[in-house]
Amino acid sequence: MGGQSWLLALHATRGRERTGGAPAGACGCAGAGGEQVARRLLLPRLSAESREESFVAGLALLGMDADWSASILDVLLEGEPAQREGLRDALRFSGRPGLEPRLLAAFERASAFARAALLDVLVARGHPPPVNLGMLVSEGTPELACAALRAARHFPAHVDQALVRQALRSELPSVRDVAQEVGLVLGLPEAWSAYEQAIARPTESWRLAAVVWALGTSGEELAPLLKGLDDPGRRRDALWALGFSGRREGAEALLPWLRDNALGPLAGEAFAAITGLPVAQGYSVPSDEDTEGDLPVPDAVRIEAWWKTARGRFNPAERYLSGVPWSPERLVELLDHGSMRRRPVLALELAIRTGGRCQLDTGLLVAQQLREVANLRGDLGRVPAGPFRELMRGGTSSSAAPRAERMIRRESRAPASSGLVVTGTGMVSAIGHGAVESCAALRARIVRPRPLPFSILRRDAPGEVVPTGHPLRGLLDGFTGMARLLKLGAFALEDLLQSTGLSASDAAFFRQTALLLCLSPTRRDDFDFQDELIVEKLPSRLLAHCGLSLPMQNVSVLHAGHAAGLLALHQVSQHLQERRFQRAVVLGVDSLVDADSLQWLADRRRLKTPESPMGLMPGEAAVAVLVESHAEAARRGATLLGSLAAVGVARMEGDVRRGVESGRALARVIRQVWPEGSSLVGDIYCDVNGEHARALEWGSAQALLQETHPVAGAHIHAPAECLGDTGAAGGLISMCASLQGFARGYAHGEQALVWSSSDSGEFAAARLSRA
C-alpha cells in the first residue's frame, strides 16, 4: 500500500478518535461536507482500480457518523480482487461498533473469494467463525481454505485438527504454507515435521521454513541456514533468517556479507538483530543508493573491529534478541518498539510458544497493536524457551470462546441423593496461599487487615478517611484489572492441581472436565462492556497461563456475584447427572480492593470506616473446587473430602435487600437443602459481611427457621470476619472451610450448611456431608 495512502488512512482514523465522528484531514472532509461529499467523493472510490484508494475511501466512510457499511459490503461482494482486498483491510482496521450483523449476513450470500475476505474481517474483530472451519478448508477455494486456516489459529475449536493435518499435505503451496504455520501454533508434531522436510530442499516455501528453523532450533542446528548462504537463490532468505536465530555463530556467518554491495544492508540488519549493535549510529557509511527497507549500508571495517571486542560477551549456547538474552519479556518489548520489518516474525514466535494464547495481528493500525501489546504484557504466563519440536504435543484447544451462562431464575435444587463428592480444593487468600493454610488460619481467626490506597471524603468534617481491607500481600503487587483476576485464579487452580496430584497436561482427564468460572459483575457504571470482555479473554488466558489441557468449549462463565459459586454447583449437579461431563472444576475469583470497586462501593456508602462502622471491608480471594460423581471418584481412587448432599437456588426480583422479605427468600432456599426432620447441621457458614442489610437478612431468616430447624444449636461462622468481603469467591470459601473441618476432625457433626446471596437477587445454599 502506498505511503501517501497509508498516511491518509492513519490521519482519518486518528481524526475519528479525536472527534468521535467523521475523520479529519484529507479523508475527513466527509465530516464537513456530509452526505454529498460521501456520495460524490468517497463512494465512487470504493470501486477504484487501486487497492489503496478503495482502502482509504472505505476507512473514511466507516469513520463517519452515517452508516455506509452496506455500500462498502456491496462492493466487497461484487468487486474486483484489488477492491476486495482494500475494503477487507478497511473493515479490519475500523473500530466502528455494530458491524458484525451486516458482516454475517454478507457472509451467507458471498462467493468463496468474498467469504475469505469477510472471514478475515470477522476474526480480526474477535468474532467466532460463522461456520465450521473444516468445511471451508476441505471444500473451499485455495483463498478460502487459507482464510479458514488463519482463523483456526484464533478459534481452534472450530476446526478438526485432522483437517489441518490433511492441509499439511496439500498440493497447493499457499494452503500448505498456512497449514504449517497454523499447525505449529496448534502444537501439531506433523507441522514441525513438514518444516524439517522443507528446510532440506530449495523450494518457493524455503524462506518461511528458514525463518521458522531459525526461531525454533538450537544453536547446533544452523547448518541448513549456513548452507543456504552458499546458494545464490537462497542467500537473501538465509541472511534474513539468520538474524532471527539469535546465535553467536549466526552473527559470525553474517560478517563476510557486510561487504556485499547488494546484500550488505540486509546482513547488517540481521547482525544488529542478534548483537544489538546500532548500525545506523556510527557503524554505517553514506550511500546515495536505495536499499531494501531503507536500511543503512554497514561499515564492515568498524563492525568487525567492534565484534573482536564484543564477541566474548555472547555465550554460544545462548539466544539473543538485539543483544539481550532471549526472554518472553524481551520478545514483547521488541514487539512494542522493535523493527517494523521484523515484528510479524516475532509475533509468530510468541504465538507458537504460547500455543496461540498470545497473538498479535501486526497488520492492524499502530494504535490497535499498541493496545494489544499492552495486554500481552500482563498475560504472558509461562512461555517455554525450548526448541519447537519439544512444544509439539498433539494440539489442545485453548482459544475458543467460552459460553456465558445465564443465572438461574427459578427455585430448584439438586436431588438429596445427588451422589456428588468433592475430591479437591485450591485457594489463595489474604491469610493463606493454599486451601489448607487459609482454612487453618480461618479456624484460628487470624486476620491481616491493612489500609488501602484509597481515601474517602468525610461527610461531617473536613478531611479524608482511609478504608481498611484484606488484600493479598506480595503475590499480586503491580497487577490490576483482568490481570489481577488472572493471577488469583491461576494460584487457586495450581493449588488444586498440587493438592490432588493431577497434571495440568493430562488432556484425557480434562477433556471430560467442565470448568465453571464464577465472577462478579463489573463494579463500574460507565464501563458496561467489561463483563463481555472478561468472558471473551479471561478463560482462555487462565487456561493457557496454567497450561491446563481443558477444551475451551467446556468452559462456562457466571457473573452472579456472591451466590455464583453455589449457583455453579447446582449447574454441575445437572451436568453430571446428564453425563455431559465426568467431573467439574468450580472456580470463584473476585477482588474488591481495586480502585474501581472501591470507588463504586464508596459512592454507595458501603465501606466500613471509622465514621461508618456498619459496612464491609473489601477483600480478594480465589477458590477452586473439584466435584465429581462418587462412582467416578472411586474408579480413579480419589480422596474424598466430603459429599454434596443438596444444592438449592432461588431468585428474588427487584431490590433484594428488604429485610424480612429477603430473609424469607433465604429461609426458603435453606429449607430446600435442609428439609424439616433431616439430620442435624453442626456448622452454618454465612454470607454476612458487616453490612446492616445482610445482617437483617440473616436475622430474619433465622427467626423464620427456628420453629422448625435447630438453628440455635449450630455453630455459626462468617469467613468475612477474617477475609473481608470476597464477592464471588465467598460461597466457595465457606465450602472449603466446612470440608476442611470434616477432613481435620474439628467439624461439629456430620453435616454443614453454606449459604450465599448476591446483590442482584440470587440466593443459594448447599448442604455438605462428611465423606
Image (cartoon, rainbow, N blue to C red):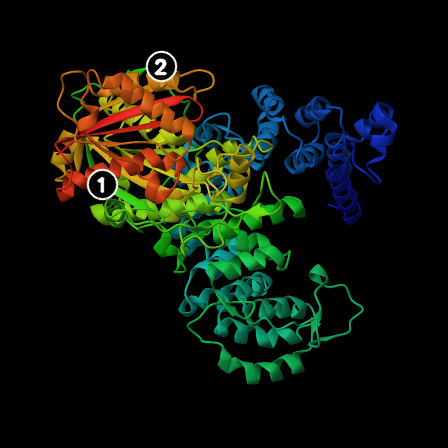
What is the total number of numbered labels drawn onto the structure image?
A: 2
**Numbered disc 1: secondary structure:** strand
Q: Position of residue 562 (x, y in %)?
A: 38, 31
Neighbourhood count class around disc 1 (C-alpha, 10 Å): few under 14, some 14–19, many 20 upward: many
Mark sitting earlier along the chain (1/2): 2
Q: Nearer the viewer, residue 206 or 289?
A: 289
Q: Residue at x 81, y 30 (%)?
A: 42
Q: Is residue 646 above or below residue 531?
A: above
Q: Residue at x 47, y 58 (%)?
A: 328
Three-letter code for the amino acid on which mark 2 is drawn: Arg
Q: Which mark is residue 410?
A: 2
Q: Which mark is residue 424?
A: 1
Q: Which mark is residue 208?
A: none
Q: State which mark lies toward you, 1 or 2.
A: 2
Q: Position of residue 132 (x, y in %)?
A: 45, 27
Q: Nearer the viewer, residue 376 or 69?
A: 376
Q: Residue at x 78, y 32 (%)?
A: 22
Q: Is residue 203 visible?
A: no
Neighbourhood count class around disc 2 (C-alpha, 10 Å): few under 14, some 14–19, many 20 upward: few
| The quadrant where residue 17 appears | top right
**Numbered disc 2: secondary structure:** loop
Q: Nearer the viewer, residue 676 or 272?
A: 676
